[in-house]
Amino acid sequence: MAVAPRKKSIISIGTAAQNRRARYDYKIGQTFEAGLVLHGPEVKSLRLGRASIAEAWAGERDGEMWLFGCHIPEYQAGSFMAKFDPVRPKKLLLHKKEIRSLTGAVTREGVTLVPMEILFNEKGRAKVVIGMAVGKKMHDKRADVAKRDWQRDKARVMRNKGGE
């Protein structure tokens, strides 16, 4: 008796959402891993890998850290009673010392708190990796692209030379 394959892959451990443009647009300094307060259907939707953090940012409100602009769409298989706002601010769980250092860096140094990825740890808890970022100028972005292209070309040449 054959078992039918799953239609959608469910993420139990690993990356659920990733901000790929963050390293291109920003110089990332120190990173923090913070817990994420979610409702039940949000967790199910996140496990399906349907979240988007491309436009998201973290900030301080009333002495707590929040994640703004993170889009977690509604879980389609859920009941009609379990509706939620897909872009509602989500509370981040950090120690007070970490919150003070992050808010201090934002006010003093002018850094931006950018979510790098949302992941599930070994215990199955949703975590978000926050990076302290400084915006790059256009010439820095061009230099990064040129460096990446050179590394790719160099690897291609070495691979072809080794095969002869």
Image (spheres, grey):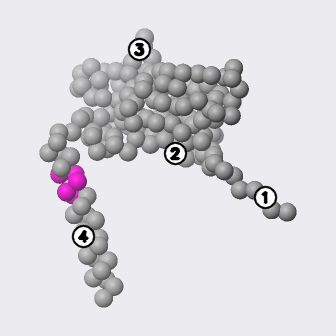
- C-alpha gap between disc 4 and disc 2: 30 Å
- Total labels: the figure holds 4
Residues at marks 3 and 4, CA–CA distance in whole angstroms: 48 Å
Residue type, label 2: Thr
- Label 4 to label 1: alpha-carbon separation: 47 Å
Question: In the current view of this chain or complex, which residue is farthest to the left?
Answer: 139
Q: Is residue 64 left or right of residue 4?
A: left
- Identified by mark 3, the residue type is Arg
Labels 1 & 3 near each other (Cβ < 8 A)? no
Report the residue marked by disc 4: 154
Q: Is residue 80 left or right of residue 159?
A: right
The mark closer to the camera, 4 or 1, is 1
Q: Residue 61, labelled with which disc? A: 3
Q: Quadrant for residue 158, please give it.
A: bottom left
Q: Secondary structure at mark 2?
A: strand
- Report the residue marked by disc 2: 15
State which quarter of the image contains the N terminus: bottom right
Pointer 1 residue? 3
Do the numbered discs 4 and 1 sit on residues whose CB atoms are within 8 Å?
no
Residue 116 placement (x, y as % from top left): 40, 39
CB atoms at circles 4 and 2 under 8 Å apart?
no
- Badge 3 element: strand
Q: Is residue 35 left or right of residue 103?
A: right
